[in-house]
Image (spheres, rainbow, N blue to C red):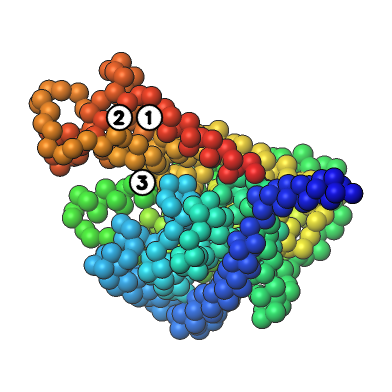
């Protein structure tokens, strides 16, 4: 009897240890708290955009096209220009008080950076300032999305709430993902997609230990928004009739088209950003003069075609309902691409998911109109292809095919396009990756010196610094002028490359400001040991 009791106790302790490994109850509790807080924050964020939009166009953001169309040309043009001046004022303050890094708006890329190369923390002041920039920009008609800034706001709230509770770095990254998942779930009324977006894009893994808290935060945020805003899909799906076998191969062709659209978007945004930056540097222009200049261009485009203003959800609904001709679909597609590139390159706040939806819907609807002329009886109507294009273009731009596919399902409430949507998203994403070799977010991070294309092992080599692993030495030790050395601020990857190039077992370490004074010593053995330990920790985090 005693032996059975002892055996039972041993089994219970073993199960307890295993459960504690996978279920951190404090993390779950904070995940639910973060989900509720982010849900209310997203509701407030959307209300603030609607308030600015009502002042600028006489209509809320959801009806900005109708509002802008009722205004005269000058008033419609002036809205983004005035908004640009206000954004400039915020950026000027942010630069003076160091609120925003490099004086730019914040979005998904900053959250990925905080997870991958930071300590899982985001400044509260940066989050508030970035949200203010995005509210003013989107309310004034800048052509961008609200979901990216909402993700950053959600991650900021998560970082603020866990700040004083001594969470480990792994738990902080998990809670950061909880904030992002909650923001997507609240923005789209799509809890499943919110969860997968955080796992796929923000955290970059599907570990069992993070799955539960992310799901809890996403569901909680969705419940909050459903209580206050109702349980409705973002778009009402029109009746597109029965789809046939021919629609799957035709959707593969649409995937190629959406891949081209995504490539055009990525390249145009990249080139526009680099040219604007070069011109500003050439003429000595501060960053806060860029938004008014961008507002002038966006205002001219929007006054001509109001469909480019704002997030563009009214344009998406109109295209799904067949309100536009083929010529108008192609015209708005080109103008929306140009307006978004100008918006993002001129320091307005906003994300890329909504523009991706608009571009995909217009490309898909145009494709459907053309296909309908050749296969009037056998192919589905343009609304079918518009919904397929919606997911294909946005998924390729963000590099998030799984979560984007589910977002389209949950936004439309229509699962009849499953096969066609998966085929189109896969082809568009593959095509974009082959040609551009990186997503929009990874391009943003590459401009800051981070290459995430090699996965966790590449990030480790970029983020661990020599000062973190070197053996410290008494200060004041002199070094010969021509002696080989490495700097304390160099990355572990750079240090290992230099040790290999010199074929040295180790090198003295100096600071950049005093290159002749030795402050430490880094051996090859110690550098490799630190790298191996970091790899093991990363593997555990990504797979347990």
- Dot 3 or dot 2, earlier in sequence: 3
User: Does 295 sit left or right of 145 as displayed?
Assistant: left
Residue situated furthest top in the rendering = 503
Where is residue 197 shown, x and y percent of the image? 62, 54
User: Does 242 sit left or right of 194 as displayed?
Assistant: right
146 or 247: which is nearer to us? 146
- Label 3: element kind: loop
Q: Name the quadrant of the C terminus.
A: top right
Indicate which label's residue lies in the foreground, 1 or 3: 1
**Pointers 3 and 2 in contact (C-beta within 8 Å):** no
Instruction: Sort mark 1 into few (<14), some (14-19) or many (20+) by Cα contacts within 10 Å.
Output: many
Residue at image location 65% in from the left, 75% down from the top: 225
- Label 1: element kind: helix
Distance of label 1 from label 3 (alpha carbons) = 24 Å
**Pointers 2 and 1 in contact (C-beta within 8 Å):** yes
363 or 145: which is nearer to us? 145
Q: Which residue position holds label 1? A: 527
Q: Is residue 147 above or below residue 463?
A: below
Residue at image location 43% in from the left, 52% down from the top: 119
Residue at image location 69% in from the left, 66% down from the top: 219
Distance of label 2 from label 1 (alpha carbons) = 7 Å
Tally of marks: 3
Residue 151 is tagged as: none
Residue 448 is tagged as: 3
| Residue 460 visible in the shown view | yes
- Dot 2 or dot 1, earlier in sequence: 2
Instruction: Sort mark 3 into few (<14), some (14-19) or many (20+) by Cα contacts within 10 Å.
Output: few
**Pointers 1 and 3 in contact (C-beta within 8 Å):** no
Residue 522 is tagged as: 2
Residue at image location 27% in from the left, 60% down from the top: 287
């Amino acid at each position: 009897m005693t032996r059975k009791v002892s055996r039972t106790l041993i089994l219970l302790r073993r199960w307890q240890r295993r459960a504690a490994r996978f279920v951190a109850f404090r993390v779950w509790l904070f995940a639910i708290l973060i989900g509720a807080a982010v849900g209310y924050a997203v509701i407030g964020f959307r209300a603030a955009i609607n308030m600015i939009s009502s002042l600028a166009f006489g209509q809320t953001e959801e009806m900005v096209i109708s509002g802008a169309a009722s205004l005269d040309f000058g008033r419609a043009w002036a809205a983004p220009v005035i908004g640009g001046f206000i954004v400039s004022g915020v950026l000027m303050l942010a630069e003076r008080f160091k609120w925003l890094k490099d004086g730019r708006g914040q979005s998904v890329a900053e959250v990925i950076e905080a997870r991958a190369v930071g300590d899982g923390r985001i400044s509260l002041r940066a989050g508030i300032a970035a949200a203010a920039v995005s509210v003013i920009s989107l309310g004034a008609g800048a052509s961008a999305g609200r979901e990216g800034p909402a993700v950053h706001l959600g991650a900021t709230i998560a970082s603020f709430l866990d700040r004083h509770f001594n969470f480990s770095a792994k738990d902080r990254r998990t809670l950061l993902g909880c904030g992002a998942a909650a923001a997507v779930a609240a923005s789209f009324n799509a809890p499943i997609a919110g969860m997968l977006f955080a796992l796929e894009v923000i955290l970059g893994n599907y570990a069992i230990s993070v799955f539960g808290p992310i799901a809890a935060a996403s569901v909680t945020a969705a419940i909050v928004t459903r209580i206050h805003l109702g349980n409705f899909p973002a778009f009402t799906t029109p009746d597109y009739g029965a789809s046939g076998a021919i629609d799957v191969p035709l959707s593969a062709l649409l995937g190629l088209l959406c891949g081209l659209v995504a490539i055009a978007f990525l390249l145009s945004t990249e080139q526009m950003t680099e040219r604007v930056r070069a011109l500003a540097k050439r003429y000595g222009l501060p960053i806060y003069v860029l938004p008014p200049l961008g507002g002038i261009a966006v205002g001219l485009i929007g006054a001509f075609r109001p469909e480019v203003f704002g997030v563009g959800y009214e344009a998406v609904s109109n295209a799904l309902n067949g309100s536009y001709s083929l010529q108008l679909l192609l015209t708005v597609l080109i103008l929306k691409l140009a307006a978004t590139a100008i918006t993002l390159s001129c320091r307005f706040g906003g994300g890329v998911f909504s523009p991706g939806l608009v571009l995909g819907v217009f490309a898909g609807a145009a494709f459907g109109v053309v296909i309908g002329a050749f296969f009037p009886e056998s192919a589905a109507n343009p609304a079918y292809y518009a919904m397929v294009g919606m997911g294909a273009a946005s998924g390729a731009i963000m590099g998030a095919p799984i979560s984007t596919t589910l977002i389209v399902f949950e936004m439309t409430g229509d699962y009849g396009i499953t096969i066609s949507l998966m085929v189109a998203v896969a082809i568009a994403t593959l095509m974009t990756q082959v040609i551009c070799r990186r997503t929009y977010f990874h391009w943003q991070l590459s401009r800051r010196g981070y290459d995430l294309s090699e996965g966790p092992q590449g990030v480790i080599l970029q983020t661990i610094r020599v000062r973190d692993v070197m053996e410290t030495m008494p200060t004041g030790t002199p070094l010969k002028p021509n002696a080989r050395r490495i700097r304390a601020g160099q990355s572990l990857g750079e240090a290992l490359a230099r040790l290999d190039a010199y074929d040295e077992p180790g090198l003295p370490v100096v600071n950049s400001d005093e290159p002749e004074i030795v402050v430490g010593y880094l051996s090859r053995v110690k550098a490799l040991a630190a790298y191996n330990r970091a790899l093991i920790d990363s593997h555990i985090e990504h797979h347990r």
